[in-house]
Amino acid sequence: MADLTWRAAAAHGSRTRALRVRTSALVVVAVVLTVLVVPLAVPLDEQAVDLGAKLLPPSPAHPFGTDEVGRDLLLRCVYGLRVSLLVGVVAALAATVIGTAAGALAGALGGWVDRAVMRIVDLFSSVPHLLLGIFVVAMFRPGIWPVVASVALTHWLSTARIVRAELLSLRTRPYTDAAVSGGSSRWRVTVRHLLPGVLPRAALAAVLMIPHAIWHESALSFLGLGLPTHEASLGNMVNSARGSLLAGDWWPTLFPGLFIIVPTLAVAGLAGAWRERLDPRRRSELTL
């Protein structure tokens, strides 16, 4: 009886994971197609200010309603999501490159290099990410690339720790000892044998970092430190809609917020499934 119960629970967990992965994949594909196709069909420059149509509720003509100056919220949300995805993907890749290089340096060389790199990681980790990001962005004019730099410089720490730990584990494997005994230099062993083993983990860290980067950009824009206020940004849209929300107009806040939450949850769902494939023990624990 207990065995049948365990099998039923395992089958239910497998179906739930499969449904979650398919749903997340469909959302990600829909988001990518939307941000690629819609700007080609309707340029943002054509979205003129129309004070006579400001704060119109959702309707067939404007499915998401209009904002405080009469612009269509659906189109603005699509352009804002495009900016958020650009910042998220570029910043995640940059942070992954920095973290992989730092972790590989610490794990491969060891000794004082390892201690120095990890002290730098601890130093950056002691400062809240948002506070450090505000400091980086405040040194430049508002724009996309200062935000990308802010996110990259505050999100490479976890990748460095993951890569270092994985390298330290791989250094104890028999094939590594065999390569060293065969006369291979430390650099050759690291490049040919160790780094290929940590790249899947580093790639997973990059995917997991995309939602954090999107939230970080939205938070900075909401605080007025990200993109210029006149540019389409989900954080800017939520910030400018605060007055409308207090007046009872909920749509200028709801839809940009959903455009932040839903795509990031979809990316996180796909990354979670990838993490389970890389770590069978974690998958079995989740099944149990």
Image (tube, helix red, strand yellow):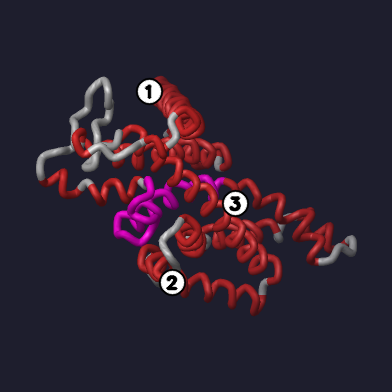
Question: In the image, is residue 229 part of the stretch drawn in magenta?
Answer: yes
Are the residues at dot 2 and dot 3 in contact (C-beta closer than 8 Å)? no
Tell which circle, 1 or 3, labels the residue nearer the N-terminal end: 1
Give the residue at mark 2.
139
User: Of helix, strand and loop, which one carries label 2?
Assistant: loop
Find disc 1 in the rendering and name its residue.
Answer: 5
Dot 2 crowding, Cα within 10 Å, few <14, some 14–19, many 20+: few
Closer to the camera, 9 or 57?
A: 57
Residue contact at pointers 1 and 2, CB within 8 angstroms: no
Q: Position of residue 171 (x, y in %)?
A: 71, 60
Which element is circle 3 on?
helix
Give the main secondary structure of the magenta stretch.
helix
Q: Give the side of residue 143 with respect to residue 98, left or right.
A: left
Query: Quick check: 145 left or right of 133?
Result: right
Dot 1, crowdedness within 10 Å: few (<14), some or many (≥20)?
few
Tell me the kind of residue under disc 1. Thr
According to the picture, the residue beneath numbered tag 3 turns out to be 202
Q: Is residue 258 above or below residue 96?
A: above
Q: Is residue 21 visible?
A: no
The magenta segment: 204-232
Q: Identify the amino acid type marked 2.
A: Met
